[in-house]
Amino acid sequence: MMRIKTKLLLLLTACLMLAGIGCGAPPATEETVNIAAALSSETGDDCYAQARLPGAIRFPEDYGPHKRFKTEWWYYTGNLKTREGRHFGFQLTFFRQALDCRVAQGESAFRTNQLYFAHFAVTDTQNKQFLSAQRMNRGSLGIAGAQALPFKTWIDDWQAAQVEREEGALRLTARARSQKQTGSPEFSVSLTLTREKPMILQGDRGLSRKGPGPADASHYYSFPGMSVRGTVTVKGESADVTGHAWFDHEWSTSALGADVAGWDWFALRINEGPKTGTDLMVCLVRRSDGTPNGYGFGSLSRLDGSIAILSESDFAITVNRTWTSPDSGRTYPAGWTIRLTTYGLEMKVSPVMEGQEHTGMFPYYEGAIQVEMSDGRGRGYVEMTGY
Amino acid sequence: MRLSPLIRTCFRSSKAQLLRTFLLIFGIALGVAGVVAIDIAKISVSKSFELSTAALTKRATHQITGADFTVPQSLFVRLRTHLGLHKTAPVIAREVLVPELDGRTLTLMGIDPFSESHFRDIRFRTGTNGISQDSGDPRTVMTRGDGVILSGSLAASGELGVDSALTLTFGGREVTTRIGALLAGGDKNPAFDGVILADIALAQEILGMGNRISRIDLVLDSDAETARVRELLPPGLTLTKTEDRNQTIRSLSRSFETSLTAFSMLVLFMGIFLIYNTVSFSVARRRGLNGTLRALGATRQEIFLSVQAEVLVYALAGSALGVGLGILLGTGAVRAVIATVSDMYYTLTVSRTHITFAILLKGVLVGILAAVGSSLMPAVNAANTRPVTLMQRSASESRLSVYLPGLTTGGVLAIAAALIIFNWPGASVNLVFAGVFLIFTGGSFLTPALVALITRGADAATVKFSGRHRLMPAMAMRNVRRSLSRTSVLIASLMVVVSVYIGIDTMTRSFRLSIVHWVDGHIGGDVHVASLDDLNRSLDKTLLDKILAMPDVRAVSAYNIHRAFSEASGEVHIFSYLRDLSKKEWTWRSPGVKRDGDVDRLLEDGWIIVSEIFARQNGLMPESQDASGGLFVAMDTLRGPETFRVAGIFRDFFMGGGRVVVSRETMKTFWGHDDITAMQIFVHGEADAKKSAVQRVMGKIRGIDRNDNAPDETPGSALLKIRSGLDIKQSILAAFDKTFLITSALQVLTAIVALTGIINSVMALILERARELGILRACGALPSQVRTLVLWECAVSGFLAGLLALPLGAFLSWVLVHVVNFRSFGWTYDMHLSGATMIQAVAFSGTAALLAGIAPAFRAGRVDIVKALRTE
């Protein structure tokens, strides 16, 4: 997960910066790759911190940013429904990227070596509408940043912040304005997320190994099955919603292997049947030939709070169906069977609707999914890159 | 095709008259060149403005700017975090001088690269493999803020590259930075040819702006958003539409360009005269030929068409030549015009010579239409006469006498119409130009009658001085009158040209005199002191006392001057003073204000006085005062918009959006400044004593400055700019002269037009009269007598043209001073008619005609009697 998201992050940074400073359209692929290479290159970057020790995560300080690491994110995805049963999916992600491992020199308050950006999306299943928006700011002046106590990360008026004096509760707010050019309407969320289950320290006590090298690892923890309550507004129409969300916080300074093409990441929650309250995360890393690279990972959180850390050998994912994006022309899987034989789980997974692709300069798929089992159902999120 | 032999005949005769054909083409070319050159200059200013300013603000729908040209950066944060307006970008922009680039003025522009996607297009130089080695990596430089970025071509012009040091000079300060990367300039990023780009953090540090920025650019999608932003704005900051703001700045130089248009119209008018003049002579000269052709069976249409076809060909040739000449002249003029606009109105960091196809096409069309149009009458004349009379020149004379009353009436009517236009306050600038056209036309129509009147009068007045010496001038005068149909064209065109000369000369002279007068009255101090640091203009408060204590010092005027931006008039200078010794000339005073002392009292009561330009830009006309004589104007202040009562409007030549004078208290209350930013020092003594006193005072002030600043070089302590009054006056006048370089060029052009025109006319006139001169010779006139006669005729024509040009020229200068200048600049000044100019003009006119007559006169003296009489 770490390495792959690092790559996503690098590519996103590169592309957004290209968009930002307008390096000219159409962007040559080689240009994009070169920028990514420039940003991820080791030269002059040797002063970044590395993720090496298991059990190093401490709270509350590790809720906040780790600016000595190159990349970091706070990832919120979840499924919501109204009292009438209308379904919405949401994603709100805050990324932090260090532009330089050295502390910025100079007296201007604009000075910073940190860049923040965010992706926000709402899936309106009933209207078959996928709405997405992004923000990017330098991490200075207070227009973007992150802090541990009380926890808060924000860009402009989008934020995830701890509810006053309640360490276990968070408020997420984001509002995307309508865009004249794309015809995209205004949409927003205002949600309170509450911890219901113990935190998962992923990998080896929070050190998630991603490759054979000693530094190929990230610090990674998750809050599974957070309960959600709040409102979703689309085109001026507000709806009270409840549901569940998955939260990831991960930071690292690692580089990616050359043969990694992308990944398929799933986080889902079973909410009907005897296994109700089970939260599962699995991720496969694909090589350029499409086969898993052997560093797949995952975790299982049961209703009673007991946790199982999974490795690639614990699960199998097979693709049943594909979908081709009319926007990017990419073909993504659109139906899977996920088996965890050891845990007696077999589920059919499919997107709640087609077209939950973030288009733009670096297209990827991040969408709400539904889960069917012989003895139950569930909801979740899938993230697919590199198609 | 039956026409072709006719046309061939015409061309053959033109070929035989190479010089005249050349003059015809040159005449057309000159007119076209003037129009094209000025059009190029004008459109280049627009383009350069677009690239210097508009292109950099293009996609922003709105801007937030401060009354003091800065905005707190915290406002940007509030827009982002409170209103969630992510289509907002903080910008720092300031003109800096770069010694490494020949002292060019460039805009140091600090941007936040991550806020830019909605605003500017900055295309980074991309080699075949992405980022080329020698141009650095602009993205890294931007994100790290460790260097500035400029266009590769700009860097190359100063032989600079990545890692070169770059010195930026602004407001008396000098900061050295490093070139971090190069950008593709030229067609890829034309706007960035005048820009030094930097991360906003670096720009803020270089300029020492603390926690302030220059402006915030915004893209606002709805009125609701606009309203929310307005609610958030603290006083002293304004939200303006980018388009409006750019227009306001742009309009400052529009008036200057309008006056250029006026000049291009004058050039065109002279060109048309020249063409008409040449073509009508060319037709007249072929009277015999055309008569023969008619007698041989050519129809009227054919004659008409053959004349037109010939003119058309020359018009095409002339226009093509004119376009080429225009491009040449225009390219030269662009530099002068852009320098003027940069000096006087706003800095153009990019100067682009912009030539469009439309301009060239317009030039060609103007040339062809003017040529064909002005040959219409002569061609019709040639075609409409019966063969037998066509061969007699006197036929056209008899026709002129028929037309004379009509022409004269037409002339009077045209002048009357022009007068109505000039006295109608609502007349647009274009209508005023039409009025100028009418004046010229009217004057030309009146010429035959006036020439007839004057020569007849002169004849009658001098008849008693009969004698040998009177013979030649008298004959010449009668000859002029006798062949009015041609001489009046010559005289009228010379008259127009000379009157243009007089008009422009008088306008420039009057303006210059007024400026000198104003400089003496307003900035007549012997020594001027201001701060070198324009971010901190405030002078040391003890300086005033120290200067007053100097024995040489007679008096000191101390001012507090601050710039402010107003939506109506752009950059405005707001003045207050501790003591003011300047003499103001009032163009309007509030009723009840009788003396300057009254004004001071009203200022204390919170009234203001404004300059003419400010008044004009804000629509403050004496007519707009209310019943009690109150005139009010709203201005942006730190407290938001405030309305002030105007006590008076004074004559002022301050550039930009004008000047407002307020009391010290008003300045403190509404603009938050209570300091001294400039002083004028008056010293004792006269002439040489004064000169040495000035030197002593300047030396002492320098001494104070050095002592105060030397020990610790504390940042923020203002270094002083000390200049003598004489020096300032000279530099103002030098700037003035530079501005009027174009008018001087136009004067030279008028002289060329005049010479070309008369050489042309005189030659035709003499050639046509070969038979008459032959008879004179046959009757016993000596070649020298014929020569003298011809020269006298030329001199008389030239003198008459000069004489007639006097009233027309005076009238034209009145129009230029009181109508064109006032309408376009809002300046008023007194017209000073100079006797010397008048005498010069008449002398020039006579001499030019005389000189033009020399070659034809010698040819006339050599007339072959037999050949000349054979046609009889």
Image (spheres, coloured by chain):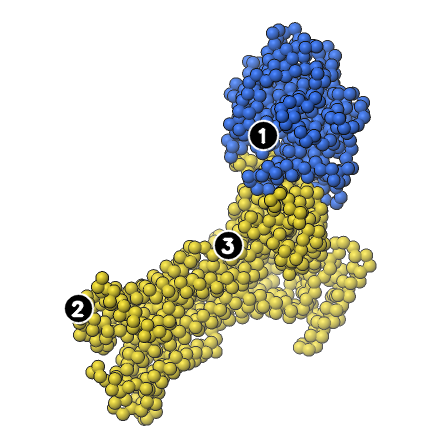
Q: Is mark 1 on a helix, strand or loop?
A: loop
Of residues B346 and B745, the one drawn nearer to the viewer in this rendering:
B745
Q: Which amino acid does label 2 sit on?
A: Gly
Of residues B680 and B378, the one drawn nearer to the viewer in this rendering:
B378
- The letter of the blue chain is A
Which residue is rendered at x = 65% and y = 6% of the image?
A: A274
10 Å crowding of disc 3: few (<14), some (14-19), many (20+): many
| Mark before the other along the chain sequence, 2 or 3 | 3
Task: Reply above or below: B122 against B589.
Answer: above
Task: Reply above or below: A252 against B140.
Answer: above
Of residues A202 and B79, the one drawn nearer to the viewer in this rendering:
A202
Identify the residue under disc 1.
A363
Q: What element carries label 3?
A: helix
Q: Nearer the viewer, mark 2 or mark 3?
A: 2
Using the rendered view, name the quadrant where residue B5 is placed: bottom left
Give the chain of mark 3. Answer: B
The x, y position of residue B740, in whole percent, is 52, 67
- The letter of the yellow chain is B
Q: Residue B423 carries which label?
A: none
Using the rendered view, name the quadrant where residue A33 is placed: top right
Give the distance between the C-alpha atoms of the residues marked 2 and 3, in whole angstroms.
Answer: 57 Å
Give the distance between the C-alpha atoms of the residues marked 1 and 2, in whole angstroms.
Answer: 84 Å
Task: Reply above or below: B216 against B25.
Answer: above
Do marks 1 and 2 share a chain?
no
Give the distance between the C-alpha atoms of the residues marked 3 and 1, in whole angstroms.
Answer: 42 Å
10 Å crowding of disc 1: few (<14), some (14-19), many (20+): some
Do marks 2 and 3 share a chain?
yes
Identify the residue under disc 2.
B297
Which residue is rendered at x = 65% and y = 15% of the image?
A: A316
Q: Which amino acid does label 3 sit on?
A: Ser
Identify the residue under disc 3.
B46
Instruction: Tell me, yes or no, whether the two marked residues, 3 and 1, touch with CB atoms within 8 Å.
Output: no
